[in-house]
């Protein structure tokens, strides 16, 4: 009887075809309709479904901090507890293959967690506390504030051969493109929402205090500065919390 792994190795083109269909599905979504987290969940789940050597998958996001401060690591889109535990151990040790992948812009392969000279303390803990025996980490994205890696885990020693790595890299490349689009869509929706809420707040001030649009915006900006509150947050308060009381800061600002 042919095992799933041998069948996979014999016909990698079918996996590429399925990845291509997945890519068309993700890339074909309307702008702003897919969140970055949705993309990551689709990719990690697909990695487990499409690549038989992959038993668990997840993504590591590293948020940059100011100089001399430790980077903040979070585990997202995990297919189960194993990726989350692995990231927790990485965070505890302050280093590991996912950090290496995101910082050095490369793919990191660990063939045997029980016999890995890099990060010996971490790998010893991983071998003791998880079923993970081999790991493949691939950089996904780099922004001014965040870096991300796709992490694939196998419960088999030497679980990832060159063919698996090539296909996983293809999946990660499509994921990176989809993530970029999802992030742009998210930023666009956020910008539109901010513009709309500020517009609503301006309209309320114009009606209540009989001022024009420019003066209404000046009032919001002045209140934002005086209260050290972001303009969009202040506008949200004006619109949804409660009407400004007569004689309050807004009325004083019109004088």
Image (spheres, grey):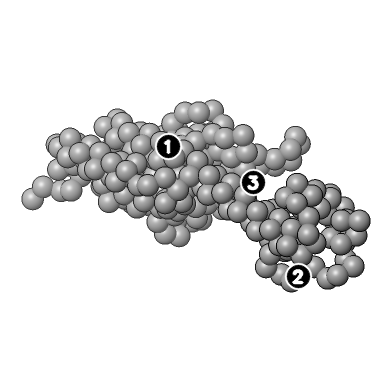
Residue at 83% over, 71% down? 245
Secondary element at tag 2:
loop
Q: Nearer the viewer, mark 3 or mark 1?
A: 1
For disc 3, the marked residue is 72
For residue 59, say whether it is visible: no
Secondary element at tag 3:
strand
With respect to residue 129, does 8 lie above or below?
above
Q: CA distance from mark 1 to mark 2?
A: 44 Å
Q: CA distance from mark 3 to mark 1?
A: 21 Å
Q: Nearer the viewer, mark 1 or mark 2?
A: 2
Q: CA distance from mark 2 to mark 3?
A: 39 Å
Residue placed most toward the observer, 15 or 38: 38
With respect to residue 85, does 53 lie above or below?
above
Tell me whether circle 3 and circle 1 mark residues in contact (CB < 8 Å). no
Residue neighbourhood size for the residue with mark 3, other residues' Cα within 10 Å, grouped as few (<14), some (14–19), many (≥20)? few
With respect to residue 101, does 194 lie above or below?
below
For disc 2, the marked residue is 243
């Amino acid at each position: 009887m042919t095992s799933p792994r041998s069948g996979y190795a014999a016909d990698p083109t079918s996996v590429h075809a399925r990845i291509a269909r997945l890519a068309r599905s993700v890339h074909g979504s309307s702008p702003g309709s897919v969140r970055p987290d949705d993309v990551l969940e689709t990719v990690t789940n697909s990695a487990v479904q499409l690549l038989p050597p992959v038993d668990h998958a997840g993504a590591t996001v590293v948020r940059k901090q100011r100089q001399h401060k430790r980077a903040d690591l979070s585990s997202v889109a995990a297919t189960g507890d194993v990726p989350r535990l692995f990231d927790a151990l990485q965070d505890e040790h302050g280093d590991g293959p996912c950090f290496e992948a995101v910082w050095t812009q490369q793919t990191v392969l660990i063939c045997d967690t029980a016999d890995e000279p890099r990060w010996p303390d971490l790998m010893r803990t991983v071998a003791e506390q998880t079923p993970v025996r081999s790991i493949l980490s691939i950089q996904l994205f780099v922004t001014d504030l965040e870096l991300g890696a796709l992490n694939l885990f196998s419960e088999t020693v030497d679980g990832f051969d060159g063919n698996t790595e090539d296909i996983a890299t293809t999946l990660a490349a499509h994921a990176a493109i989809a993530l970029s689009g999802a992030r742009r869509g998210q930023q666009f929706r956020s910008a539109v929402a901010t513009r709309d809420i500020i517009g609503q707040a301006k309209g309320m001030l114009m009606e209540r205090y009989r001022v024009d649009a420019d003066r209404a915006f000046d009032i919001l900006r002045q209140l934002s500065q005086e209260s050290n509150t972001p303009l969009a947050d202040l506008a949200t308060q004006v619109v949804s919390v409660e009407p400004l009381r007569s004689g309050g800061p807004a009325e004083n600002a019109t004088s």
